[in-house]
Image (cartoon, helix red, strand yellow):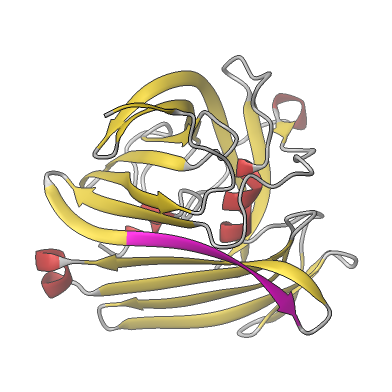
Amino acid sequence: MTKLAIVLLILLGFKAPSFSQKQLTVITPISPVPAFMDGEELNYTLHYGFIKAGEAKMTLTKERFGGAFDVFHATAKANTTGLAKKLFPVLDVYESFFDINTNLPIKSIRNIREGNYKYYNEVYFDHYANTIKSQLTGEHKVPAFIHDMVSAFYYIRRVDFSTYKGGEIVSVDTYFGDEVFPFYIIFKGRETVHTSLGKFKCLKFVPIVEPGRIFKESDDMTFWLSDDENKVPVQIKMDMLVGSFKCDLSGYKNNKFEMKSKVGN
């Protein structure tokens, strides 16, 4: 259960394989119109095999940062439930304050409680100097346009995939656990996905993960975004060394656009 956050944030725990720059398609530019708005809430149910293992929620609010300018404040929470909670209680909270226009993060917070393990850190981003300042480890040089895990999640939702045919590799650099993690995903095309909420037309992606630590193969994770203007994550599936996880969209509200991707019950 210590990898519960991986189910919530599909970006976590990945290491980049060897790719030349010519093989990569950088995720840029993003749409000037965000695919989300103040008040959006996404809820998920997490299953380990046939057992309900936990719940996750992502919320978004528009706030004034430092009294200077408006930002989106995104909060992602994941926790175990039922028997899983009794066996191994988990409450993971990730927060990101990111620029409304560029989607680049200004501050991120990671607050982890997993069994007896606790971790808390705040990271501040300086995109002019290409540095970050970690509360725990100080200042570090980072690549330009660096993201935290949560801002990257919303950044991908602002990418226009309408011209993508399948097979393209997209990438974004992220900063997590005081390390730079390049994040690569392969666009696989379009599929209809079944959930407890009904059927959704979706965009299919396969993140490139590192075999051996958590996954057997480099393509053991798949996720689907709603094939509409919202690009809401609808489902995530993972085949891991210790079993299989599935994360299903269980509720949503205050979406910016109509969920036109929902096509049936």
Report if residue 85 is visible in the image: yes
Taking the image as shown, residue 154 lies to the left or right of residue 8, namely right
Identify whether 229 is placed above or below 162: below
Q: Residue at x 57, y 59 (%)?
A: 150
Say if the magenta span includes residue 126.
no
Secondary structure mostly seen in the magenta stretch: strand
Numbered label tally = 0
Identify whether 142 is placed above or below 216: below
Report if residue 181 is visible in the image: no
Residue 73 position in % (x across, y down): 62, 69
| Foreground pick, 68 / 20 | 68
| Foreground pick, 121 / 80 | 80
Task: Tell me which corner region of the image, top left, top right, bottom left or bottom right, holds residue 175.
Answer: bottom right
| Foreground pick, 196 / 132 | 196
Identify whether 226 is placed above or below 88: above
- Magenta span of residues: 56-65
Rendered-image quadrant of the C terminus: top left
Taking the image as shown, residue 111 lies to the left or right of residue 107, namely left
Rendered-image quadrant of the N terminus: bottom left
Residue 169 position in % (x across, y down): 63, 28
Q: Residue at x 12, y 74 (%)?
A: 86
Residue sticking out furthest to the right? 128
Q: Residue at x 66, y 39 (%)?
A: 171
